[in-house]
Amino acid sequence: RSKDQSGGMYHCYEPQLHVAAEERRILEQALRKALSNDELDVHYQPVVDAGTGSLKGFEALVRWTHPELGSISPAKFIPLAEDARLIAPIGEWVLRSACAEAATWPGETRIAVNVSPEQLHNPGFVAIVASALANSGLPASRLELEVTESVFMRDDTGAVKVLERILGLGVRLSLDDFGTGYSSLGYLSRTKFSTIKIDRSFVIGASKKVPEAIAIIRAVVALAQSLGMATTAEGVETEDEHRMVQDLGCTKVQGYYFGRPLPVAEARSLAQRDWSDRAAA
Ligand code: C2E
Ligand code: MG
Ligand code: MG
Ligand code: MG
């Protein structure tokens, strides 16, 4: 590293950073073609009732399998897609695929789809949601859009207006990864979320008896209850973690303990099995 004379900033000459930049460039090029090359796929992770264990719905999670590079994590390519202005077409494709699939599920089984801030800053996104519902025949009440606190960090007003119009369609909203962003609780009183999703980091902390993690989950559950919202504990991997978040009053749970994100056919048969089990009960 060499210190910049003028501003005290650091110029980086580490070869590693060049590799990262090069990797980014390659991935971005590949991602531009991923949709048309049919390399994207949607997996579905079960979300269950914390008390009864019955299936409430699924979260749609995009998957990318590159012919040479293999499978690439969304944690890596979603931020890249956001920077490269590719998130709008990818997000729209996930939304349309997920709605079409969810329309085949029985009963009230819900589908949650992640939405990036970029998508919400486009007023045309409301028409995309309406069209995904109309084309699939999925009732609006069975669609839930997951947004993160970061939506509220930039210019509030554009995104909040879009969210309001989406609520007007009868679609639900949930607040994802709660507690990991720069929260100002003000937006919870302005926008009607149905569910607050408590990030896995707090679930891990609580099961390790970290007092702060327990206190935070307790406070979020109390806040959600008083605002008439449900809470989903994310990333529940063990029976211990399940018991803990259930004791703390979380209403829904999601995680490897209940099911990994599943390929479309497996999710569909799980939805049907759960439905016939309940019909038989
Ligand atoms: P997220 O929305 O918070 O999704 C939950 C992530 O936690 C998923 O990672 C899921 O596979 C993982 N997970 C679920 N249960 C467990 C568990 O028990 N233990 C652990 N360790 N992890 C668990 P995934 O699929 O890698 O997705 C990562 C993130 O990428 C998502 O976080 C979401 O922010 C983003 N993402 C995925 N699909 C989409 C999409 O279609 N659109 C947008 N905008 N973002 C997406
Ligand atoms: Mg999510
Ligand atoms: Mg999450
Ligand atoms: Mg998360």
Image (cartoon, helix red, strand yellow):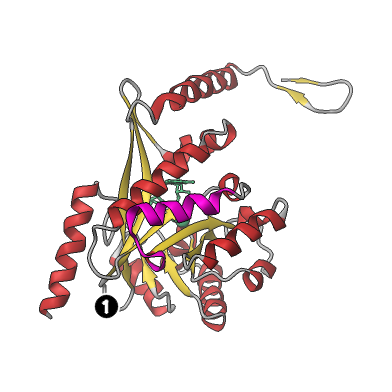
In depth, the one of 4 and 65 nearer the eye is 65
x, y (%) of residue 215? 55, 74
Query: Which residue ends up furthest to the bottom in the rendered image?
Result: 226
Q: Name the residue tied to disc 1.
A: 52
The front one of 220 and 77 is 77
Our reading of the magenta stretch's main secondary structure is helix
Residue 167 % position (x, y)? 53, 66
Which residue is pictured at 45% across the width and 27% down the height?
31
- Which residue shows up at 47% across the image and 35% down it? 77
Magenta highlight range: 124-141
- Is 122 placed above or below 1 here? below
Q: Locate the C terminus by quadrant.
A: bottom left
Q: Is residue 17 left or right of residue 34?
A: right
The extreme left residue here reads 280
Locate residue 186: give its quadrant. Answer: bottom right
| Direction from residue 243 to residue 218 in the image, left or right | right
Where residue 149 sits in the image (x, y, percent)? Answer: 60, 57
Vertical order, 32 against 91 (above or below): above
